[in-house]
Amino acid sequence: MLALLLGLLPQRRAARVLPSLAGVGAIVAAGIVSATLWGDDQTALSGNFVSDQFTLLLNFVFLGAALATLALAWREPSSTDKRGEYAGLILLSTAGMMLVGAAGTTIVLFLGIELLSVALYVLCAIETWRSRSLESGLKYLIIGAVGSSLFVYGLALLYGASGTTVLADVGGRLADSGLTGDPLAIAALALIVVGLGFKASAVPFHMWTPDVYEGAPTPITAFMATATKAAAFAALMRVFSESLIGLVDDWKPVIAALAAVTIIVGNLAALAQTNMKRLLAFSGVAQAGYLLMGVAAGTLAGVEAVLYYLLAYLVMTLAAFAVVVAREREVPEGDTIASLRGYGRAEPTLGIVLTISMLSLAGFPPLSGFVGKFLLFSSAVDADMTWLAIVGAVGSMISLGYYLRVIGVAWMSEAPAERRLRPSASVAAVGVTAGVMVVVLALGAGVALDLCRDAAQSIIG
């Protein structure tokens, strides 16, 4: 609310600067509070709000993505003229994501999903002078509304089948009949999977992703690609890994099949893309498939792998989008792969950042993307789903076709003669920091995995 009000100040410079500073202050404060609460499981509002290590770890993902988005948007045209709305809506969406991670009941889970979504509908269409931005916001609104409707209908049926909205109690209420023995529970499960599948960009509910990613302002695309996906998987893990973990044999085949289809379709579709934002959109679809492997495993190791990969996915995706933002401000079609011709030679620092990001997304050792995929594949094998791990390995090999193509264009082509702008300090800082963190997460994988294991134990035991 403060960021929105500061954007109304009559002094033009203050209205541009203060909302973002308020946003940064809020994000830092929330991060400090989350760090001080680590280790203490608490509940509030009659169990509707849960603060455990799972909640707090995901808070750092959401807050990190929000902070990077504010930095990437520092000179964005839409954020310059509408800084209060830009910063305020990013914070509101982040608050919704934090509610999803902290949901103790299905009611709060749905409220969090809606809060994060409504703010993003506006942010996608905030560049009102661009038809593609308006189209992006409209498509996301329509598809998001359908997904939310199906999701809340599924939660209503789940309440009808279990007689409770408390996530920790749902599984126990359904233990006697199981999911397969109760048609109401089967319908609830199907609708919940579809609703969260839209948010996670899982196939076949991914159709909105490339168009919305391409049309939205690039900093918002980066925010959606990282934080929204993390929120969707937070909801999936709250429902399946926590609430319904005792019925894992009933829902495991559904999630595993969804993961396999998502991996194959996402990687094959990315091969045909010439636009970086669309390529990263389909790449994100494939990455959702890898993450679904960990959910499908239904084990502590699976949840631990998902949490680690969300951390790795955050930094390697932000690194890639930082390069896209920098290039967009230099040339008219800066979001295409062709615009990166010779970019590595012309801007070696951001070229190295782009290379690290692409290699990590492809799963090259010893980067954090490789560590995350290794953990996910291992969890699938341990859960007697070796076939799914093979599908994941094949998908990773297919992904080399488009990740290495980007690297080749950036380094093996001659840079065109053009007037080149130095990347802004905020964009360069996000890119370099994210690139370094891709390596740090791999080198410090032991520490990161300890944190992820503690967070996983807080919901799955």
Image (cartoon, helix red, strand yellow):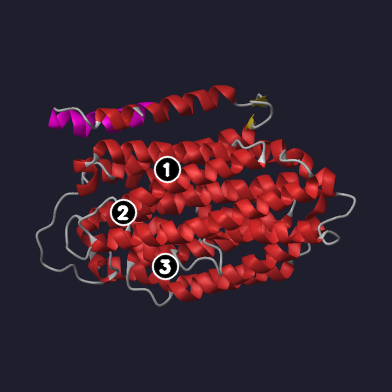
Q: Position of residue 449 (x, y in %)?
A: 62, 42
Read off the residue under disc 2: 125
400 relative to 44 in the view: left or right? left
Residue 117 location in percent, x, y? Answer: 46, 48
Magenta range is 11-25
Q: Can you name the residue that lies furthest to the right here?
A: 176
User: Magenta segment: does it hold 22?
Assistant: yes
Q: Which residue is mark 1?
A: 65
* Horizontal side of residue 73 vs 192, given as left or right: left
- The residue singled out by tag 3 in the image is 403
Residue 130 magenta-highlighted: no
Categorize mark 3 by other alpha carbons within 10 Å: few (<14), some (14-19), many (20+).
Answer: many
Q: Does residue 22 appear in the picture of this structure?
A: yes
Quadrant where the C terminus is found in the figure: top right
Q: Amino acid at mark 1?
A: Ala
Q: Are marks 1 and 3 in contact (CB under 8 Å)?
A: no
Q: Secondary structure at mark 2?
A: loop
Viewer-nearest of discs 2 and 1? 2
Q: Is residue 40 above or below residue 219?
A: above
Q: Amino acid at mark 3?
A: Tyr
User: Residue at 37% across / 74% down in the picture?
Assistant: 273
> Closer to the camera, 34 or 326?
34
Whole-angstrom CA distance, mark 1 to mark 3, is 23 Å
Residue 26 tag number: none
- For the point 83% across and 44% down, which residue is it? 173
